[in-house]
Amino acid sequence: MQPIRIKICGITREEDALTAAYLGVDALGFIFAPKSPRYIEPEIAAKIIAALPPFVSRVGVFVDADEETVVRTARIAGLDTLQLHGSETPEFCSRMPLPVVKALGLRPDFDYSLLEAYPVAGILLDSWDKGLQGGSGIAGDWNLARRITDRCRNVILAGGLGPSNVESAVEAVQPYGVDLNSGVEIMPGVKNPHKMRDAVRIIRHRRPLP
């Protein structure tokens, strides 16, 4: 059984970043979409990133930012991966100077051709809401997500995941990784260390499927 990679997103505080890192998560996410309640300035993210131990990936989350903004923010903050949550085209993704994770919504009319169209390192599946971008915090259609993981490697599952449901989500979808955010928070941008610990422990110690 391969280990599930764990990313905790929406980091705004150094103490949360360090707690997550020492719990053994694989990646931390910093949201650079100005409309997000978890938005962080690149300079502040840079200070948090500078305090991290080695071997933790630094992911920048963007929603329809222009190419110059993405590249400049990545340089200032010290990112090593980009996560794009808007309507970015395959061509836009291919021009990025860092590995890209492209977010796609788990909508009923999901277009499977997108899995082939995007030249990216990974696909993030989030619940779909026509009025929201950048993550809804609501659990998505895990049956649809499993059909997608059957066709695509390196799928990351997001959407309202936390200690209460992450084991069921992993068993149902069998993703490459999970993205935790609102499900391990006290309030937007402030993580709950106990929920982070419990979620990581559940994922790391889950029982193998029969």
Image: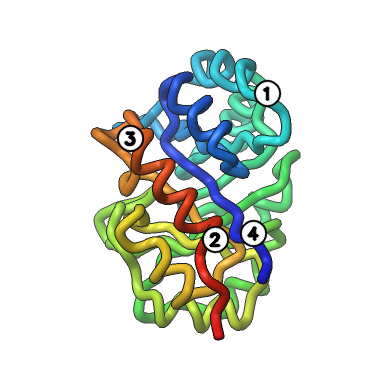
Q: Disc 3 or 2, which lies upstream in sequence? A: 2
Q: Which amino acid type is marked by label 1?
A: Arg
Q: CA distance from mark 3 to mark 2?
A: 22 Å
Q: Disc 1 on helix, strand or loop? A: helix
Q: Are marks 1 and 3 in contact (CB under 8 Å)?
A: no
Depth check: 207 or 191 in front? Answer: 207
Instruction: Count neighbours of disc 3 (C-alpha within 10 A) and say few if under 14, some if 14 to 19, many if 20 or more.
Output: some
Q: Disc 4 or 3, which lies upstream in sequence? A: 4
Q: Disc 1 or 2, which lies upstream in sequence? A: 1
Q: Which residue is mark 4?
A: 122
Image coordinates of residue 181 in percent, x first then y, are 38, 44
Q: Which amino acid type is marked by label 2?
A: Ile
Q: Is residue 79 left or right of residue 203?
A: right
Q: Which residue is mark 1?
A: 75
Q: Disc 4 or 2, which lies upstream in sequence? A: 4
Q: Which residue is mark 3?
A: 192
Instruction: Count neighbours of disc 4 (C-alpha within 10 A) and say few if under 14, some if 14 to 19, many if 20 or more.
Output: many
